[in-house]
């Protein structure tokens, strides 16, 4: 076949018969995309891998358990030839040619009439990468180009603004605990596409520095609130900017719904009919202990972990926390916003039955360059916080999990 470049095209296979010959690894890799395309797939093969068999069991493909026979491709729109028998592959290829059925061959790209591109998806777009000539085929290179494009679009390092589909509104994005690498790929992409970003102090501040100059970055803590409550002023700012037709990202630390007042913002936007999407984030309650070598659960040690806000003391009438019940639990307690009140909290837990020897770790500014971990027990934590000058933001972990990790390297 002459070395002309392949002509790229997107086959719309929904409801159309596609014949797959051979049920091995190649079929296993290719079938999911054919299934996703809605093709009417007939697999002809005496054997199949367990995954391919599962697709047949699930009714996603029809499996004829026999070798290829002449005539199998007659009614096909498209064929994948991937048996382990070179003679069968050659015969099937010849049949495909006779019936003008485009076919890919796993054993010899040169003899195929179609090639499968390396594909990936990003926000309603399929990225397909083909090598130009059969001779120069380098599947790893095409896959690497595909990965670079898809990853770049996902993490926002490759910016391709949506001109038609981008709708104004607000995205409530959980930014993770602080390390800029710990935001989700969706969050990062929305950030890259934003016109306005309203950010909290906690969270991946470093990402803000990467935003293009036209993006307006507003520090939520600095919005003047006059006669409003601070939260109301933030809600109003979100509404105001979205009403101007802008794409607004509300960037929050951790996850928006873990002590993040995220739902208040969702409700305020819903009341005025502004569309809002919520992008979950990695909460500091799990990730910050993890970054300091503390698993919140561990086999044989803790079968539960409870995340509690410590922003009001246990004896404060505004407290909604049942501290006596928490003292009776044997698992892990994770306390956010608790540095100021840890003395009272530890006292209450001990008074209601938790051992004063229970290990405690405070992890300050977790996942950032300033991360530090300070260890204590319930008996000593109040004094340790004073002596070591532990400051918010810190996650406090109480329980035996504090001691299960290896000793940190000296
Ligand atoms: C208002 S809460 C918000 C929590 C956030 N929505 C989340 O899911 O992580 C703030 C508290 O989270 C904790 N926190 C958040 N980021 C932290 C970090 N990088 N290091 C230590 N604690 C952190 C601290 O306890 C802080 O006082």
Image (tube, rainbow, N blue to C red):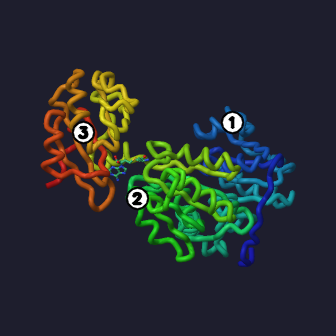
Quadrant for the N terminus, please: bottom right
Residue 401, above or below 287: above
- Of tags 1 and 2, the one toward the viewer is 2
- Which tag, 2 or 3, sits closer to the chain's start? 2
**Where, by quadrant of the figure, is residue 339 drawn?**
top left
Q: Which residue is drawn at 48% across and 50% down?
A: 281
Quadrant for the C terminus, please: bottom left
Task: Using the image, tell me which numbered label, if any, was put on residue 175.
Answer: none
Residue at image mark 1: 56
Q: Distance between the residues labelled 1 and 2?
A: 52 Å
For residue 263, side relative to residue 4 (left or right): left
- Which tag, 1 or 2, sits closer to the chain's start? 1
Residue at image mark 2: 201
Measuring from the top left, give residue 41's x and y in whole percent: 76, 44
Q: Distance between the residues labelled 1 and 3?
A: 58 Å
Measuring from the top left, give residue 269's x and y in whole percent: 63, 50
For residue 118, side relative to residue 232 (left or right): right
User: Around disc 3, counting alpha carbons within 10 Å, would you say few (fewer than 14), some (14 to 19), or many (20 or more)?
Assistant: many
**Where, by quadrant of the figure, is residue 356 drawn?**
top left
For residue 252, side relative to residue 236 (left or right): left
For residue 243, side relative to residue 286 (left or right): right
- Which tag, 1 or 3, sits closer to the chain's start? 1
Q: How far apart are marks 2 and 3 (CA)?
A: 22 Å
Residue at image mark 3: 342
Measuring from the top left, give residue 67's x and y in whole percent: 71, 42
Asked if the residues shown at circle 1 and circle 3 are in contact, with their CB atoms under 8 angstroms apart, the answer is no
Residue 410, above or below 266: below
Asked if the residues shown at circle 2 and circle 3 are in contact, with their CB atoms under 8 angstroms apart, the answer is no
Asked whether the viewer can see residue 107, the reply is no
In this rendered view, identify the residue nearer to me: 375 or 271: 271
């Amino acid at each position: 076949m002459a070395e002309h470049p392949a002509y790229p095209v997107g086959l719309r296979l929904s409801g159309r018969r596609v014949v797959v010959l051979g049920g091995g690894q190649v079929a296993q890799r290719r079938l999911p995309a054919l299934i996703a395309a809605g093709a009417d797939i007939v697999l002809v093969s005496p054997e199949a891998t367990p995954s391919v068999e599962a697709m047949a069991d699930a009714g996603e493909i029809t499996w004829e358990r026999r070798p290829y026979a002449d005539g199998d491709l007659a009614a096909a729109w498209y064929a994948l030839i991937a048996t382990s028998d070179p003679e069968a592959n050659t015969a099937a290829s010849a049949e495909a040619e006779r019936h003008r059925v485009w076919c890919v061959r796993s054993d010899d790209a040169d003899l195929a009439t179609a090639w499968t591109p390396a594909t990936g998806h990003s926000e309603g777009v399929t990225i397909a990468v083909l090598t130009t000539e059969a001779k120069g085929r380098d599947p790893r290179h095409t896959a690497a180009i595909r990965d670079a494009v898809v990853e770049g679009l996902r993490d926002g390092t490759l910016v391709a603004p949506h001109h038609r589909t981008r709708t104004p509104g607000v995205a409530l994005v959980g930014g993770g605990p602080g390390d800029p690498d710990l935001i989700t790929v969706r969050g990062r992409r929305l950030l890259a596409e934003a016109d306005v970003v309203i950010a909290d102090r906690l969270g991946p501040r470093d990402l803000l520095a990467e935003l293009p100059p036209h993006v307006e970055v507003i520090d939520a803590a600095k919005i003047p609130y006059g006669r409003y409550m601070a939260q109301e002023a933030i809600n109003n700012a979100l509404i105001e900017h979205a009403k101007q037709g802008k794409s607004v990202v509300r960037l929050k630390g951790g996850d928006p719904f873990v002590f993040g007042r995220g739902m208040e913002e969702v409700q305020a936007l819903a009341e005025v009919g502004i569309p809002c999407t919520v992008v979950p984030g990695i909460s500091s309650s799990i990730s910050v202990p993890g970054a300091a070598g503390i698993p919140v659960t561990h086999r044989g040690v803790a079968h539960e972990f409870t995340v509690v806000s410590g922003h009001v003391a246990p004896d404060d009438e505004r407290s909604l926390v049942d501290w006596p019940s928490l003292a009776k639990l044997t698992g892990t307690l994770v306390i956010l916003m608790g540095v100021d009140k840890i003395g009272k909290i530890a006292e209450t837990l001990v008074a209601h039955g938790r051992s004063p020897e229970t290990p405690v770790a405070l992890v300050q500014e977790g996942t950032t360059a300033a991360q530090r971990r300070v260890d204590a027990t319930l008996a000593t934590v109040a004094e340790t916080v004073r002596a070591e000058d532990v400051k918010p933001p810190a996650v406090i972990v109480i329980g035996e999990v504090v001691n299960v990790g290896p000793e940190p390297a000296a």
